[in-house]
Amino acid sequence: MGLRERKKQATRRALQDAAVSLILDRGLENVTVEEIAAEADVSTRTFFNYFATKEDALLGDVPGTPDEETRREFVNGGPTGDFVEDLITVLITFLVSTDDLATQRADMRLRRKLMEREPQLVRGMLARFHNVEMELAAAIAERTGVSPEDDQPLLVAASAMSVMRHTMKSLHFSESEETADVRAKIRAAFRHLGEAYGPSTPTS
Amino acid sequence: MGLRERKKQATRRALQDAAVSLILDRGLENVTVEEIAAEADVSTRTFFNYFATKEDALLGDVPGTPDEETRREFVNGGPTGDFVEDLITVLITFLVSTDDLATQRADMRLRRKLMEREPQLVRGMLARFHNVEMELAAAIAERTGVSPEDDQPLLVAASAMSVMRHTMKSLHFSESEETADVRAKIRAAFRHLGEAYGPSTPTS
DNA sequence: ACCAATTATTGCAGACCATGCAAACTTTCT
DNA sequence: AGAAAGTTTGCATGGTCTGCAATAATTGGT
């Protein structure tokens, strides 16, 4: 990666960090883009070269898109052949960004604090999940061979994203948390959904 | 209802209608609040007495909150005792506003057109569904006697709202469409979810 | 090391959204 | 009719975000 690219990443990072820290400190309404830019040592105009809105700088890069390889494997019926297990595999990749693991976990903890303090941000988060939902639906349609006009894949994708969303709330993002723990939590959530809506007696 | 109240309703209506029609015509970015207010024959300032944002005037009043009676019946295990069927009953009440049925159906058709033309609006719609999701989760927790800290009710509510969201897409909102049709569509969606995640063999 | 091409940053002007405030106006109630 | 309560309006203001054109930094070739 060349110098130019590295600098861009650094600026992006600086803007995000400045935004998060200032706003955790003083609240969303009491921090202007101008101040965020100043803190990151760039002009206000440059802020908008990096992020379309103030919110955007706060939300970070999660959920992202799964890499092409994971996607293809899922579409082709892998890796295990069990639909729910494979779905979980894909979902987990949404959580993983390009950063190193420790940084990313710290980011997640900060973001969660941010959401608690500024519920307006949930709006933007939901929008992001919605975008991912569409991609996931396409992948599910491909895997199951269902016509894209059908909205079954959309439905399954939507509820899968719900599971995702709520599971994230009960994660710790601590150093001791293993992928297996995450997987187990998601699995439990899916099982519960199956029980609630499934053919067997509704627990409720 | 007194004169004052009637006038307020009329103004609100006029603003919504002006917003929807102007923006269907010329696009979200090409219509200012000033123009909307002018079309409705009030000042710009008055617009903001009625709606917090431009989007708000477009989204209308759906989904609304179910009336207290329906809610209580659901919480107490009614009306049929079958969880999914009763859930559907509640969901349907989200769609019903105070207007007369014909007006409401026309509104729904317009709004859908609006969403297709201006996908940015989906954001706001999702936020509304999210609010309803919270209320629904509370009701489910009460009915099932699950602790409110538990996130099972949130999960079930979230996926129910997904079902809702996607079912609405395939409704016609035409004069010939009966409540029974709507119910059948929602029921089919739930059954599909149960099959996808449930204990039986995944269709996929 | 230099030059040219590409790409990033910046300042400026401007449109629009949204809010607070106080004055003018309308409905309501007695 | 007249006071009380609520609504509309204009004005001033602060903030977000965009387009544009000038300036500055990085890159790659020679």
Image (cartoon, coloured by chain):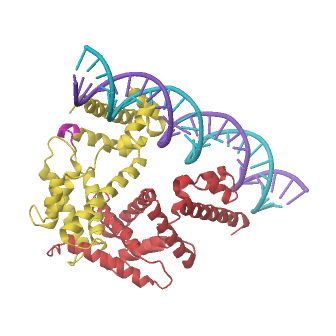
Chain colours: A yellow, B red, C cyan, D purple
- Image point (62%, 56%), residue name: B36
Q: Specify start and end residues of the magenta stretch as a single range.
A: A98-103
Instruction: Between residue B144 and residue B177, name the one nearer to us.
Output: B177
Location of the N terminus of chain A (image quadrant): top left
Residue A196 quadrant: bottom left
Q: Quadrant of the C terminus of chain A?
A: bottom left
Let me know if residue B125 appears in the view.
yes
Residue A31, how many percent across, how many down? Answer: 46, 34
- Give the side of residue B191 with respect to residue A85, left or right: right
Pick the front one: B45 or B158: B45
Q: How many marks?
A: 0
Does B192 sit above or below residue A107?
below
Residue at (39% x, 75% y) in the render: B170
Residue at position x 52%, y 52% in the image: B29
Res A152 → quadrant: bottom left
Does B182 lie within the magenta span? Answer: no
Q: In the image shown, does B187 or A66 lie closer to the viewer? A: A66
x, y (%) of residue A84? 16, 65
How far across and down, in percent of the image, does residue A63 sit?
28, 50
On the image, which quarter does residue B50 sit in? bottom right
Eyeballing the image, is A62 above or below A153? above
Q: Examine the rendering and report whether any part of residue B48 can be seen.
A: no
Residue B138 lies left or right of residue D1; in this view the side is: left
Give how far across and how far down residue A165 sits, in percent: 29, 55
Along the horizontal axis of the image, is B70 left or right of B21?
left
